[in-house]
Amino acid sequence: MNAKLGKEKVFSQVVGHHTLHNISNENGEMEANYAISNDMFLISTNFQHKKIHTGMWISPDHQTINQVDHVMVSKQKMGLIHDVRSKRSYNCDSDHFLVQIKIKQKLIPVKNRQIQKYKWDRQLINQKEKTNKYQ
């Protein structure tokens, strides 16, 4: 969306404290309004990293770094996301960097699960009729 999210009080319910920008652009306002109306949170602004790991786009002159790619998640599932950062080392032929998301989810163990065990009837192997039919 190329959305720059700022630190405005209006969007504090959906934007974290660790965004690179102070003022949102038009796309950022639309993205924040969408998150508000759908009870979501822009989790990529919630983790503190160095500027090089927060920026998702770099200008061709390598002077300007922007945080324009974001991860939006339901507020109910925010606890599953443990980290979001950019990965600069991969060459994907784009001026945008890859976004790494670390998710940790606990699986619910299944208890008292009945597993059927099949026993082979070894006496049938000795019968010539069954052996011939199998062959």
Image: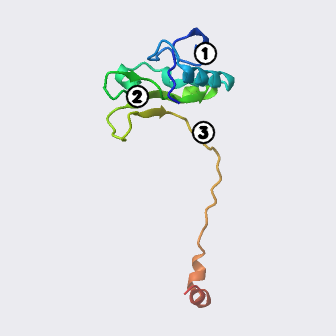
Q: What residue is shown at x 47% (from left), y 26% (from top)?
A: 68
Residue at which label 3 appears: 108
Residue at which label 2 appears: 57
Dot 3: element: loop
**Closer to the camera in the image, 60 or 37:** 60
Q: What residue is shown at x 60% (from left), y 39% (from top)?
A: 108
Q: Residues within 10 Å of mark 3 (few under 14, many from 20)?
A: few
Front: mark 3 or 2: 2
Q: Earlier in the sequence, mark 2 or mark 1?
A: 1
Asked if labels 1 and 2 touch by Cβ distance under 8 angstroms, the answer is: no
Q: Residues within 10 Å of mark 1 (few under 14, many from 20)?
A: some
Residue 39 percent location from the top left of the image: 66, 24
Judge left or right: residue 90 versus residue 68.
Answer: left
**Closer to the camera in the image, 128 or 54:** 54
Residue 105 percent location from the top left of the image: 54, 35
Q: Looking at the rendered structure, which numbered label has been put on residue 99?
A: none
Q: Earlier in the sequence, mark 3 or mark 1?
A: 1
Q: Earlier in the sequence, mark 3 or mark 2?
A: 2
Against 107, residue 39 (above or below) is above
Amino acid type indicated by mark 2:
Trp
Front: mark 3 or 1: 1
Label 3 vs label 1: CA separation? 31 Å
Amino acid type indicated by mark 1:
Gln
Of all residues, the one furthest to the top in this rendering is 9
Residue at which label 1 appears: 13
**Closer to the camera in the image, 66 or 38:** 66
Residue 47 percent location from the top left of the image: 46, 21
Residue 45 percent location from the top left of the image: 49, 21
Amino acid type indicated by mark 3:
Ile
Label 3 vs label 2: CA separation? 38 Å
